[in-house]
Amino acid sequence: MKKAILALFVGYISMIAIVSNAYARTVNLCDWQLDGNIAVNSDYVLLTNAAGKSLKLTNNNQVFIDNQPIDVSEALKPLVAEYHQRLRITVPAIVDIALDGLEIGLTVVTDIFSSIAGTPPPASLAAAMENIRTDIATHLSRNQQTVQLNGSTTQMLNSSIDQAVDDLKPSFIASVTGAVLMNLGQSMASGDGDLEERLDGFASRMENLSEELETKIRAKTAKLEVQAQALCVQMTALQATEMNLQAAMPALTSFAVVQREPKPNSI
Protein backbone atom coordinates (compact mmCIF):
# COMPACT_ATOMS: atom_id res chain seq x y z
CA MET A 1 0.00 0.00 0.00
CA LYS A 2 2.75 2.47 0.96
CA LYS A 3 4.54 1.70 -2.31
CA ALA A 4 1.41 2.41 -4.32
CA ILE A 5 0.72 5.67 -2.52
CA LEU A 6 4.36 6.75 -2.94
CA ALA A 7 4.20 6.01 -6.67
CA LEU A 8 0.97 7.99 -6.87
CA PHE A 9 2.51 11.09 -5.34
CA VAL A 10 5.67 10.75 -7.43
CA GLY A 11 3.50 10.83 -10.55
CA TYR A 12 1.49 13.76 -9.20
CA ILE A 13 4.58 15.81 -8.34
CA SER A 14 5.95 15.05 -11.82
CA MET A 15 2.85 16.66 -13.29
CA ILE A 16 3.36 19.85 -11.29
CA ALA A 17 7.07 19.95 -12.16
CA ILE A 18 6.23 19.84 -15.87
CA VAL A 19 4.54 23.23 -15.61
CA SER A 20 7.70 24.86 -14.29
CA ASN A 21 9.86 22.97 -16.81
CA ALA A 22 7.77 24.29 -19.68
CA TYR A 23 8.67 27.85 -18.67
CA ALA A 24 12.20 26.98 -17.60
CA ARG A 25 13.08 26.47 -21.26
CA THR A 26 12.67 30.19 -21.84
CA VAL A 27 15.41 31.35 -24.16
CA ASN A 28 18.73 32.68 -23.00
CA LEU A 29 19.84 35.79 -24.86
CA CYS A 30 23.54 35.30 -24.15
CA ASP A 31 25.03 38.38 -22.52
CA TRP A 32 22.70 41.00 -24.01
CA GLN A 33 19.21 42.36 -23.53
CA LEU A 34 17.16 45.13 -25.12
CA ASP A 35 16.01 47.98 -22.86
CA GLY A 36 13.45 50.67 -23.57
CA ASN A 37 10.32 50.81 -25.67
CA ILE A 38 10.71 49.71 -29.28
CA ALA A 39 8.07 49.68 -32.01
CA VAL A 40 8.65 48.18 -35.44
CA ASN A 41 6.27 48.68 -38.36
CA SER A 42 6.51 48.64 -42.13
CA ASP A 43 7.71 52.27 -42.35
CA TYR A 44 10.09 52.82 -39.44
CA VAL A 45 11.58 51.66 -36.16
CA LEU A 46 10.78 53.89 -33.18
CA LEU A 47 12.86 53.83 -29.97
CA THR A 48 11.73 55.64 -26.83
CA ASN A 49 14.14 55.97 -23.91
CA ALA A 50 13.44 56.28 -20.18
CA ALA A 51 13.38 60.08 -20.46
CA GLY A 52 10.60 59.92 -23.03
CA LYS A 53 12.77 61.05 -25.95
CA SER A 54 12.22 59.26 -29.26
CA LEU A 55 14.49 58.10 -32.05
CA LYS A 56 12.94 57.18 -35.40
CA LEU A 57 14.80 55.32 -38.14
CA THR A 58 12.99 55.23 -41.48
CA ASN A 59 13.30 52.89 -44.41
CA ASN A 60 15.14 55.50 -46.49
CA ASN A 61 17.83 55.96 -43.78
CA GLN A 62 16.41 59.14 -42.29
CA VAL A 63 16.94 59.74 -38.57
CA PHE A 64 14.64 61.80 -36.34
CA ILE A 65 15.05 62.68 -32.66
CA ASP A 66 11.77 63.86 -31.14
CA ASN A 67 10.48 64.22 -34.71
CA GLN A 68 13.31 66.57 -35.65
CA PRO A 69 15.47 65.40 -38.59
CA ILE A 70 19.12 64.64 -37.91
CA ASP A 71 21.65 65.09 -40.66
CA VAL A 72 23.17 61.80 -41.81
CA SER A 73 26.17 61.93 -44.10
CA GLU A 74 26.39 59.64 -47.10
CA ALA A 75 29.24 57.82 -45.41
CA LEU A 76 27.08 56.99 -42.37
CA LYS A 77 23.92 55.97 -44.20
CA PRO A 78 25.06 52.33 -44.61
CA LEU A 79 25.67 52.09 -40.84
CA VAL A 80 22.27 53.64 -40.10
CA ALA A 81 20.68 51.20 -42.53
CA GLU A 82 22.46 48.26 -40.89
CA TYR A 83 21.30 49.29 -37.41
CA HIS A 84 17.76 49.84 -38.63
CA GLN A 85 17.68 46.46 -40.31
CA ARG A 86 19.13 44.61 -37.32
CA LEU A 87 16.49 46.12 -35.05
CA ARG A 88 13.81 45.23 -37.58
CA ILE A 89 14.91 41.58 -37.48
CA THR A 90 15.77 41.21 -33.79
CA VAL A 91 12.77 42.83 -32.07
CA PRO A 92 10.12 40.69 -33.83
CA ALA A 93 12.24 37.60 -33.15
CA ILE A 94 12.26 38.36 -29.42
CA VAL A 95 8.53 38.99 -29.34
CA ASP A 96 7.77 35.85 -31.34
CA ILE A 97 9.89 33.62 -29.11
CA ALA A 98 8.47 35.10 -25.92
CA LEU A 99 4.83 34.82 -26.99
CA ASP A 100 5.28 31.37 -28.52
CA GLY A 101 7.05 30.15 -25.38
CA LEU A 102 4.26 31.54 -23.21
CA GLU A 103 1.60 29.76 -25.25
CA ILE A 104 3.54 26.51 -25.06
CA GLY A 105 3.61 26.79 -21.28
CA LEU A 106 -0.10 27.56 -21.02
CA THR A 107 -0.95 24.79 -23.47
CA VAL A 108 0.97 22.35 -21.28
CA VAL A 109 -1.08 23.45 -18.26
CA THR A 110 -4.27 22.80 -20.23
CA ASP A 111 -3.00 19.45 -21.48
CA ILE A 112 -2.07 18.30 -17.98
CA PHE A 113 -5.41 19.18 -16.50
CA SER A 114 -7.42 17.83 -19.42
CA SER A 115 -5.44 14.59 -19.44
CA ILE A 116 -6.07 14.02 -15.73
CA ALA A 117 -9.63 15.27 -15.44
CA GLY A 118 -10.94 14.53 -18.92
CA THR A 119 -12.41 18.06 -19.04
CA PRO A 120 -11.13 21.55 -19.90
CA PRO A 121 -9.57 23.58 -17.06
CA PRO A 122 -12.08 25.08 -14.60
CA ALA A 123 -12.97 28.75 -14.78
CA SER A 124 -10.55 29.70 -11.98
CA LEU A 125 -7.55 28.15 -13.77
CA ALA A 126 -8.62 29.52 -17.16
CA ALA A 127 -8.90 33.00 -15.61
CA ALA A 128 -5.42 32.69 -14.07
CA MET A 129 -3.96 31.80 -17.48
CA GLU A 130 -5.79 34.69 -19.14
CA ASN A 131 -4.39 37.08 -16.51
CA ILE A 132 -0.90 35.95 -17.50
CA ARG A 133 -1.62 36.68 -21.17
CA THR A 134 -2.96 40.12 -20.23
CA ASP A 135 0.11 40.94 -18.13
CA ILE A 136 2.55 39.85 -20.85
CA ALA A 137 0.58 41.85 -23.43
CA THR A 138 1.45 45.05 -21.54
CA HIS A 139 5.12 44.36 -22.30
CA LEU A 140 5.04 42.99 -25.81
CA SER A 141 2.61 42.53 -28.67
CA ARG A 142 2.44 41.71 -32.35
CA ASN A 143 -0.15 42.30 -35.04
CA GLN A 144 -0.18 42.83 -38.78
CA GLN A 145 0.95 46.44 -38.47
CA THR A 146 3.33 46.71 -35.50
CA VAL A 147 5.58 44.67 -33.23
CA GLN A 148 5.98 46.33 -29.83
CA LEU A 149 8.45 45.58 -27.01
CA ASN A 150 8.22 47.60 -23.78
CA GLY A 151 10.71 47.12 -20.97
CA SER A 152 13.67 44.76 -21.20
CA THR A 153 14.13 41.36 -22.75
CA THR A 154 15.22 39.99 -19.39
CA GLN A 155 11.91 41.14 -17.98
CA MET A 156 10.08 39.72 -20.97
CA LEU A 157 11.71 36.35 -21.04
CA ASN A 158 12.66 35.72 -17.43
CA SER A 159 11.09 37.86 -14.71
CA SER A 160 7.60 38.01 -16.21
CA ILE A 161 7.60 34.31 -17.04
CA ASP A 162 8.89 33.37 -13.59
CA GLN A 163 6.22 35.53 -12.00
CA ALA A 164 3.63 33.99 -14.28
CA VAL A 165 4.58 30.53 -13.04
CA ASP A 166 4.38 31.66 -9.41
CA ASP A 167 1.00 33.28 -10.00
CA LEU A 168 -0.35 30.25 -11.81
CA LYS A 169 0.83 27.53 -9.44
CA PRO A 170 -1.81 27.99 -6.71
CA SER A 171 -4.69 27.80 -9.19
CA PHE A 172 -3.08 24.93 -11.03
CA ILE A 173 -2.27 22.90 -7.93
CA ALA A 174 -5.75 23.42 -6.48
CA SER A 175 -7.42 22.45 -9.74
CA VAL A 176 -5.25 19.45 -10.54
CA THR A 177 -5.41 18.20 -6.94
CA GLY A 178 -9.17 18.10 -7.16
CA ALA A 179 -8.98 16.22 -10.46
CA VAL A 180 -6.45 13.73 -9.07
CA LEU A 181 -8.55 13.04 -5.98
CA MET A 182 -11.68 12.62 -8.07
CA ASN A 183 -10.00 10.16 -10.43
CA LEU A 184 -8.38 8.38 -7.52
CA GLY A 185 -11.77 7.99 -5.88
CA GLN A 186 -13.16 6.56 -9.11
CA SER A 187 -10.26 4.13 -9.32
CA MET A 188 -10.77 3.02 -5.72
CA ALA A 189 -14.50 2.56 -6.29
CA SER A 190 -14.13 0.71 -9.57
CA GLY A 191 -14.11 -2.70 -7.90
CA ASP A 192 -11.55 -4.13 -10.35
CA GLY A 193 -8.80 -5.77 -8.27
CA ASP A 194 -7.86 -4.94 -4.71
CA LEU A 195 -7.23 -1.39 -3.48
CA GLU A 196 -3.45 -1.56 -3.81
CA GLU A 197 -3.71 -2.80 -7.39
CA ARG A 198 -6.06 0.04 -8.25
CA LEU A 199 -3.71 2.56 -6.65
CA ASP A 200 -0.78 1.04 -8.54
CA GLY A 201 -2.73 1.28 -11.78
CA PHE A 202 -3.65 4.91 -11.20
CA ALA A 203 -0.08 5.83 -10.24
CA SER A 204 1.21 4.07 -13.36
CA ARG A 205 -1.17 6.06 -15.56
CA MET A 206 0.03 9.28 -13.91
CA GLU A 207 3.68 8.42 -14.54
CA ASN A 208 3.00 7.45 -18.16
CA LEU A 209 1.07 10.66 -18.70
CA SER A 210 3.96 12.65 -17.22
CA GLU A 211 6.39 11.06 -19.69
CA GLU A 212 4.04 11.65 -22.63
CA LEU A 213 3.61 15.32 -21.77
CA GLU A 214 7.35 15.79 -21.26
CA THR A 215 7.91 14.36 -24.74
CA LYS A 216 5.35 16.77 -26.17
CA ILE A 217 7.05 19.71 -24.49
CA ARG A 218 10.42 18.75 -25.93
CA ALA A 219 8.93 18.56 -29.41
CA LYS A 220 7.23 21.94 -29.07
CA THR A 221 10.27 23.72 -27.63
CA ALA A 222 12.81 22.25 -30.07
CA LYS A 223 12.01 24.92 -32.66
CA LEU A 224 12.23 27.69 -30.05
CA GLU A 225 15.64 26.47 -28.93
CA VAL A 226 16.94 26.72 -32.50
CA GLN A 227 15.45 30.21 -32.81
CA ALA A 228 17.05 31.20 -29.51
CA GLN A 229 20.50 30.27 -30.77
CA ALA A 230 19.96 32.41 -33.86
CA LEU A 231 18.65 35.24 -31.68
CA CYS A 232 21.80 35.16 -29.57
CA VAL A 233 23.89 35.78 -32.70
CA GLN A 234 21.54 38.58 -33.78
CA MET A 235 21.74 40.30 -30.39
CA THR A 236 25.54 40.22 -30.41
CA ALA A 237 25.67 41.68 -33.92
CA LEU A 238 23.11 44.35 -33.01
CA GLN A 239 25.16 45.40 -29.99
CA ALA A 240 28.29 45.84 -32.12
CA THR A 241 26.42 47.85 -34.74
CA GLU A 242 24.83 50.08 -32.09
CA MET A 243 28.21 50.85 -30.53
CA ASN A 244 29.68 51.74 -33.94
CA LEU A 245 26.75 53.98 -34.81
CA GLN A 246 26.82 55.82 -31.49
CA ALA A 247 30.55 56.37 -31.80
CA ALA A 248 29.92 57.97 -35.18
CA MET A 249 26.76 59.84 -34.09
CA PRO A 250 27.08 60.84 -30.40
CA ALA A 251 23.56 62.33 -30.47
CA LEU A 252 22.24 58.75 -30.42
CA THR A 253 24.03 57.64 -27.25
CA SER A 254 20.96 58.27 -25.06
CA PHE A 255 19.13 55.62 -27.09
CA ALA A 256 21.41 52.70 -26.28
CA VAL A 257 18.89 49.85 -26.22
CA VAL A 258 21.36 46.95 -26.17
CA GLN A 259 22.61 46.41 -22.65
CA ARG A 260 24.62 43.70 -20.96
CA GLU A 261 22.24 41.38 -19.16
CA PRO A 262 22.61 41.61 -15.38
CA LYS A 263 23.97 38.46 -13.80
CA PRO A 264 23.03 37.22 -10.33
CA ASN A 265 25.69 37.73 -7.70
CA SER A 266 27.76 34.63 -7.13
CA ILE A 267 28.27 33.35 -3.61
Image: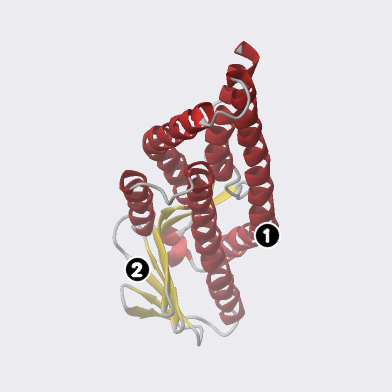
| Residue tagged 1 | 223
Q: Residue at x 38, y 55 (%)?
A: 133
Near mark 1 (Cα within 10 A), the count class, few <14, some 14-19 or many ≥20, is: few
The residues tagged by marks 1 and 2 sit, at their Cα atoms, a distance apart of 35 Å
Q: Which residue is drawn at 61% across and 80% down?
A: 78
Residue 79 at x, y percent in the picture: 60, 74
62 in relation to 129, above or below:
below
For the C terminus, the quadrant is: top right
Q: Which residue is drawn at 40% across and 33% down?
A: 178
| Residue tagged 2 | 54
Residue 3 at x, y percent in the picture: 65, 15
Q: Is residue 162 visible?
A: yes
Residue 149 located left or right of residue 210: left
Residue 146 at x, y percent in the picture: 41, 75
Q: Which residue is drawn at 57% across and 47% down?
A: 26
Question: What's the amino acid at mark 1?
Answer: Lys
159 in relation to 193, above or below:
below
Which of pointers 1 and 2 lies earlier in the amino acid sequence? 2
Q: What element carries label 2?
A: strand
Q: Is residue 225 visible?
A: no
